[in-house]
Image (cartoon, coloured by chain):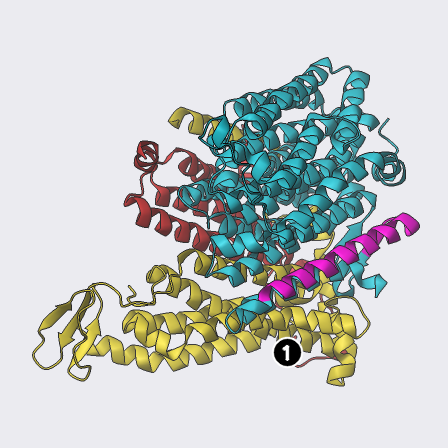
Chain colours: A cyan, B red, C yellow
Amino acid sequence: MSQQYPALLVIVPLLSALVISAAGWINKRLCFPIAVAALGVAAYSCIGLLLRVLEEGAIVYRLGGWDPPMGIAYYVDHLNGLVLVVVSVVAFLNLIASKKSIELELPDKTAPFYALYVLQVTGLLGIVATGDAFNLYVLLEITALSGYAMLAMGKDRAQLSTLNYLYMGTIGACFYLLGVGYLYIVTGSLNMVDIANILPPLYESKAVLGAFIICLVGVWVKMAFFPLHAWLPNAYTHGPSAASSLIAPLVTKVMIYVMIRLILTVFTPEFAFNILAVSKPIVWLAVAAIFMGAILALAERNLKKMLTYIIVAEVGYMVGGAWLGNRTGMTGAILHIVNDALMTLCAFLVVSNIAYKLKGYAFDDLKGLVRKMPFTMGAFVIAALSIIGVPPTCGFFSKWYLISGAIQAGQYAFMVALLFSSLVNVVLFFRVIEICYYEPFSNGHGHDHHPEPMAEAPLTMLVPLFIVAAGLVLVGLYTGDIVNNIIEFAIPKSIV
Amino acid sequence: MGDLIQIVVAKYNYWIYITLMMIGLYAMIVKNNLVKKIVGMNIFQTAIILFYVSTGAKRGATIPILEHGHGEHGAGAHMVHAVDYINPLPHVLMLTAIVVSVATLGVALALAIRIYNRHNTLEEDEILAQIREK
Amino acid sequence: MKILGLIIALSTGVLLIYATGDFPGWADPASPASLHLSPHFIEKTMEETSVPNIVTAVLADYRGYDTMYETAVIFTAGLACFILLRIFVREEPGDRLYRHLLTGVTVRVKEGAKLPPSEDFERIDATWTPPDLIIKTICRFLIPFIQLFALYVIAHGHHSPGGGFQGGVILGASIILLAISQDLRTSVRRMREKLDAVLCAVGVIIYAGTGALCLLLGLNFLDYSALASVLHCDPVTARSHGILIVEIGVGIAVMCTMIWIYNNVSSTGKYDEGL
């Protein structure tokens, strides 16, 4: 069976999503166990696949039995394997933590919501594992459509925000499709490795330049890279908590993986860094993204919206790191994919807990929260330390690599932006923690001061939160192993 | 001048479809009414489909269904020449793209219905004004 | 905003047109796209899959994995429209209109009032038009023939243009024709919501399940030659039969999704009055 891991990790969730959708009409209580089992099998297959890749090198799985480029092939190497494990584990933990929240916010539509959840995870896993450019577009659309449906189930402005997300997302996906079309016209192939083999004599042609630019812009729209980020804060804030905590950590990171895959495998680094001279302008754009994300986050008085602006800044880190053009920067970007997924999951699970017990998460609602929900706030402090970049949490190590890469490449503006962003994060998070820890919750003066009873979130929401918070520290401590055994082999030798 | 005419005659299909795409893109960005934006999105996606399908054409070739294919198996089959049939791959890819565009259209219209039920208008500036008032 | 939109559209258009500078001319038989993969597809389809329609062979066999996800996309769209719009109304709906059959008098029944006895009164939509005998009768006659044609399109996809998607849409259109020519309640009586939703999932399960069956029989996912042992034929014919099975799955899924989306969107989720 271990030969079939690449197929299992998408086919089991896909079949389960269909069974959940059909079973929801018969008995609603079947849906959650089926979903958990499916994502568990997917996570197991991803971990097994990564272990196989570490032993054997890159794996090619021929779907339908046809050799690429005739048929579609999965191409799993170190870069893929790592991101696959992150995506499946994050989705699994989030599903367990979100059960109560889904039942509270969407009481009569839990079955279709679980089906859409598992479909979204299928799409994300497929995007990461595939080696075919057009297959990536179809999976991108599954991810996007199930994401729109889930995010639109929120209240108030959710539908308008999701419609704007739909417009931007469709433009991004269509630009990507155009780029693949241009590549197909000049090379005749759709398989990523095959295109990379055919392209070298064509590097000077205008069509390849056009294809690269339009693919890149399409992927930037989908990952909310400044200035194309306007859809992200509204869409992620107004969605239901379970949807936000699935989509926010994962979708933008998977898009960054797609960009790195385009740079490293399809258009080799030779073309992206040496022949085109766009690295410097892109790093400047990343600097602008980090500044704007930080400044806009400062202006927010709503915890969830503040976190979404932090995501915009984090996307700036990763895009800038990837385009620095040296090995350290690329290592930092890939490591940050892993770390940022975990940090964002931790932060959004905290917000989900808060939304479950209180009814809002504006700053005014958070007063004195530490007495009511001490464990949740403890996890929030760990997430905050990681986003700021304090050792030994994982956020410190990826920032370290990014800053070293910036100094090595001579891009001092990027280094300044990273440090500025850390300082702004300190202000942002200590402001929230101060409100939660120090302001009195009750309205009496000293003599009437009963300690508030602890009204912590239920255990199914707390245990995954602890696992993720512990994971932040563990991943930080094991950074050396991850970098030397996995990421080192993910980056081609041609990058110095 | 003769050169320019040559280029136009060889590539005018791509240029027409790119113009159509840009009309759709312009409509999506500029129009105020939500349904007009959805129509613009549909124009954009349809133009991309036409662009791909036009790349599959071949001068003097017929549709990609093998002639004399019905009922012939094994060694009695005629020799098939690739130049006689147009390129099937763009057609296959665009079947997928058409389905994706219909699916996106369905979801967008469902969202527009929800927004209309809530705000009683489909003009984006009026909706934003109503939200700001709340 | 208009100027910004104009600048974006113009600059993107100029970039794209500039990039077509290196394209092969239109309909050039020596273009890279025509020389790399397509000759293999055109020349080897008959001997590898025994299906004369090359587009069907590529769609359902060589690139069958894409088509499975395409079916999943259309299923996701149906599910999305359902989750967004559907309101399960338990209590009695608001104002309803009833029409006395013998005299033609229309009665408006307000919320919470008692229903009139049902033999003499028929429920009508708010956008009711007098029933046209010609339209109703002709549609009733045509629908079975439309469905027969749709089944032909699905089954004959191997030899003529057609296949699962096209046939599925025609099947869905036949039920939607019933809803348009009569009213939504009639079509929902014929094709109940629960059956529709479950069949939609079953259609995609047929596709993915066939692929999973091939996986369980030892070969890779969606490798139809593994079905040779189940169907008792040689691997090439097994591919042809495998393509037919998945096309049937696709047809069922597309039909049910079209009906599902139409029902949800036209009644905005309440399933009481259509267009």
Q: Main secondary structure of the magenta part?
A: helix
A408 or B23: nearer the viewer: A408
Q: Is residue A55 magenta?
A: yes
Question: Is A20 positioned to the left or the right of A261 in the image?
Answer: left
Q: Is residue A67 magenta?
A: no
Q: Is residue C90 above or below residue A114?
A: below
Per the image, label 1 sits on a secondary structure element best described as loop
Instruction: Output the chain of dot 1.
Output: B
- Bounds of the magenta segment: A31-60
C201 or A75: nearer the viewer: C201
C33 or A148: nearer the viewer: A148
| Residue labelled with disc 1 | B70
Question: Is C109 positioned to the left or the right of A135 in the image?
Answer: left
Q: Is residue C173 above or below residue A310?
A: below
Question: Is A361 positioned to the left or the right of C129 in the image?
Answer: right
Question: x and y percent of residue A214 in the render?
Answer: 61, 35
C217 or C226: nearer the viewer: C217
Q: Residue at 31% of width from left, 73% of height from top?
A: C185
Toward which corner of the image does residue C148 lie, by quadrant? bottom left
Q: Residue at 64% of width from left, 31% of height from top?
A: A315
Q: Amino acid at mark 1?
A: His
Q: Residue at 80% of width from left, 21% of height from top?
A: A404
Disc 1 packing (10 Å; few <14; some 14–19; many ≥20): some
Residue B102 seen in the figure: yes
Q: Which quadrant, please, contains the N terminus of chain A?
A: bottom right
Residue A285 seen in the figure: no
Q: Which quadrant, please, contains the C terminus of chain A?
A: top right
